[in-house]
Image (cartoon, helix red, strand yellow):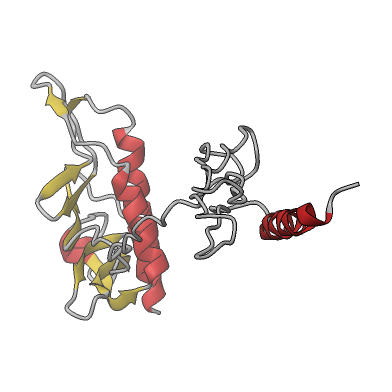
Amino acid sequence: MPSLRSKPFLMATAVAIAEIVSVGCGGDTSRGQAESSQGNVSTGGAQSSDGVGGAVSDGGQPNGGSGGRASTGGRGGTAGSGGSISEGGTGGMGPPPIPFDVLTLRRGPAAGYCLQPGDILQAGIVYGETGDYGMSGAVFREWDESRPDACWGIESPDCVISEEFDLILTATRVAELAALLAVLPEDRCQLDENMECDPCVLTTLVVDRTAYSNDCCGTQLSAGYDEAFQTVVTFLDGLAPEAG
């Protein structure tokens, strides 16, 4: 049975253990007391990177022993200082890129002049200061048969009845057109002087300063060019009737 003189020491030890348990896991758990009847309390023991804080010395020695070392593999070590918070960049939420400034489409006669109602004779699409794309031009409607002396059996520009149009393209239409232009290959026609060609209608597309045409009397070196070119032209023809 402990002597009466040892009871104060046992009680002080129990209080110190209770304080350590109440702190729990996580940050630095070493505690120092400013005063102690048992001597100067030492600093807490060193901690491993992931260990529980070192046990606190009870100050039982006259000069205060050093705290024990934390066991390895415990939970939570001393919490590191938070890293500096970097400010987010000024990410771009600006307007979408402009696919082109000016686009023109023209059809003209070759040896013949094969037109279908709704074909664009000439049209231009221009990016305006308001951020919209305006499209204007004229489409072929029919042949003028009121002048048989001049136009009977002859398909020429003098016999064309056309209809003008003017409209603003929707954002959806612009996006669709931009997608078609993005996959249109370069016009790399290798002319063959020995070939005789008559496309009947000469169709020319100019996007800014880049020209495309259906008049390749020779070999087209860009794979898929003819199909991609015709797809763009057909799409543009389909826009004209929207003018009403």
| Near-viewer residue (144 or 27) | 27
Can see residue 182?
Answer: yes
Identify whether 50 is placed above or below 9.
above
Q: Could you tell me residue 164's position as x and y percent?
A: 26, 76
**Image coords of residue 61 (percent x, y):** 57, 46
Tell me if 21 is positioned left or right of 135 in this view: right
Give the tally of numbered discs: 0
Q: Which picture quadrant has residue 215?
A: top left
Residue at 31 percent across and 54 percent down: it is 115
Left or right: 30 as drawn, with respect to 133: right
Q: Is residue 166 above or below residue 15?
A: below
**What is the quadrant of residue 84 in the picture?**
bottom left
Q: Is residue 116 visible?
A: no
- Which residue is at the far right? 1
Residue 146 drawn at (x, y percent): 27, 73
Q: Nearer the viewer, residue 95 or 28?
A: 28
Between 97 and 214, the one nearer to me in the picture: 97
Picture coordinates of residue 170 (x, y %)? Answer: 38, 72
Image point (8%, 22%), residue name: 193
The picture quadrant where one finds residue 4 is bottom right
Q: Looking at the image, which is closer to me, 32 or 64?
A: 64
Q: Residue at x 54, y 62 (%)?
A: 33
Q: Quadrant of the C terminus?
A: bottom left
Q: Residue at x 65, y 51 (%)?
A: 25
